[in-house]
Image (cartoon, rainbow, N blue to C red):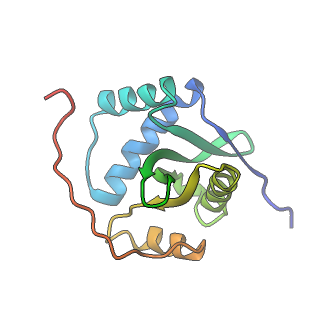
Amino acid sequence: MTQEVITVRSATFDDLDTIAAFNQAMALETENKTLDPHVATAGVKAGLTDPGKCMFFVAEVAGTVAGQAMITTEWSDWHNGFFWWIQSVYVEIAYRRRGVFRKLYDYIHDMARGRHDVCGLRLYVHRDNKQALNAYREIGMTLTDYLLCEEEWAAGS
């Protein structure tokens, strides 16, 4: 049996529509939320335009984008380093359970470990997303004692 080749790379503007579509699919699937396609596309475009906002990575199988992840940073004065937050994780349904997320995670993990200013990786996951929780546990991540609190509104309002 031939092992499927999965490659990970930094996203480019050519990936804009795919990432925006994946974000919309993820929101609907995991939280039953419908994202405004114009806002979703503008958000990805802003991230691709300004590396200070985030970094997008995509995983490809035979030249097809099969998954994605986005990294944002949080400065920790307690650790004198940045936590990299893994966000907007999505793997196309046809490519799940084939190592796509693992490849993305390993790529991001190795990149973060290679930097002197990064002190760890974090992510948040919806409490009902059992499939994602299992995947994160399988790669060695653990649940923390922290709960997430937020106040949300539309940007610019």
Q: How many marks?
A: 0
Residue at position x 54%, y 54% from top?
A: 91
Residue 27, position in %: x, y?
34, 50
Where does the C terminus fall, quadrant-wise?
A: top left
Whether residue 116 sits left or right of residue 46 in the image: it is right
Residue 51, position in %: x, y?
52, 30
Q: Quadrant of residue 156?
A: top left
Residue at position x 39%, y 47% from top?
A: 25
Residue 24, position in %: x, y?
37, 43
Residue at position x 46%, y 67% from top?
A: 132
**Closest to the observer: 79 or 67?**
79
Q: Quadrant of residue 113?
A: bottom right
Q: Is residue 32 above or below residue 68?
A: below
Residue at position x 39%, y 61% from top?
A: 124
Residue 127, position in %: x, y?
32, 71
Which residue is most to the right?
Answer: 1
**Closest to the observer: 56 or 61?**
56
Where does the N terminus fall, quadrant-wise?
A: bottom right
